[in-house]
Image (spheres, helix red, strand yellow):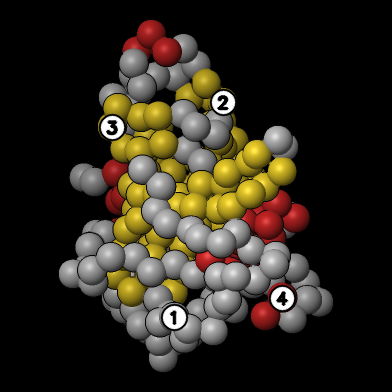
Amino acid sequence: MTRLILLSLALLALLAAGCQNDPVGMTPDQTLTPTVPDKGTAELSPRDLWTDYNASLEAEYEVFEGLYTPGTDAILGGILQSWPGTYAAGITIPAGALPDDYGPVTISISVPKFKKHVPYEDQPPMVIILEPDGIQFIEPVEVMVYYPPWLDDPDGSPLFKVFCMQPVYVNGQLERVGYSDFQWLDRGTVTATPGPLVFQVPHFSRWETGQDEPDDGTADPNDDDLPPDITELP
């Protein structure tokens, strides 16, 4: 049984215990395997990186937190209470993710809240915060989230981009925002309701996911409010 199915079963148990709504896309036979389509290199807009990172600093989050003991398999997650509808988020940590002598560590996954009475276009970007920031894993940790339905374009591409945001500060000031660990995911359409996004992370930080949208060339890299050049960081 895969870790994703275990996570789905655990979150389904939470749904049954604390929610009267039917679960959305969470049954084990609807689980998805991440794929990496042959789409070439990433093309991320400097404007989007800069804007989304700053927006993530101001956003409010739903936080799921727990104490993890290395050497054990663990599942952390829950139902997003602020989102319209029934959606979940969670992570699974394999027993070999950290050295056995690492010691217990508090981990958390934070997902942006849906802000009532705020237009859809003004909702925060889908930036997921995994903490403690910077912790490195021997075996990758699996993340499962749903893309916010209010940001989704059902007629758009089923491809989604996932990447780690890499802010660069100089003398305490944000100078630029790069990215690393770029992945393409195929969310698929298992049912009329699109399934969750599932991806693996080698370390904790801020991870953003977004629906694939071609760059229309309107971003100005010489804008005074933006850094002059942003490329993938090693």
Residue under label 2, please give it.
106
Kind of residue at disc 2 = Thr
Whole-angstrom CA distance, mark 2 to mark 4, is: 32 Å
Residue under label 4, please give it.
122
Kind of residue at disc 1 = Asp
Instruction: Note whether 19 is above or below 99 in the view shown.
Output: below
Question: In the drawing, does residue 139 fall left or right of residue 219?
Answer: left
Q: Nearer the viewer, residue 190 or 34?
A: 34
Kind of residue at disc 3 = Glu
Q: In what element is the residue under mark 4?
A: helix
Please tell me which residue is depicted at 50% across the width and 79% down the height of the picture. 152
Residue under label 3, please give it.
139
Label 1 or label 3, whichever lies nearer to me, is 1
Residue 128's x, y, as percent? 54, 52
Q: Is residue 11 visible?
A: no
Q: Nearer the viewer, residue 180 or 134?
A: 180
Quadrant in which the N terminus appears: top left
**Quick one: label 3, few (<14), some, or many (20+) residues within 10 Å?**
some
Whole-angstrom CA distance, mark 4 to mark 3, is: 37 Å
Q: In what element is the residue under mark 2?
A: strand
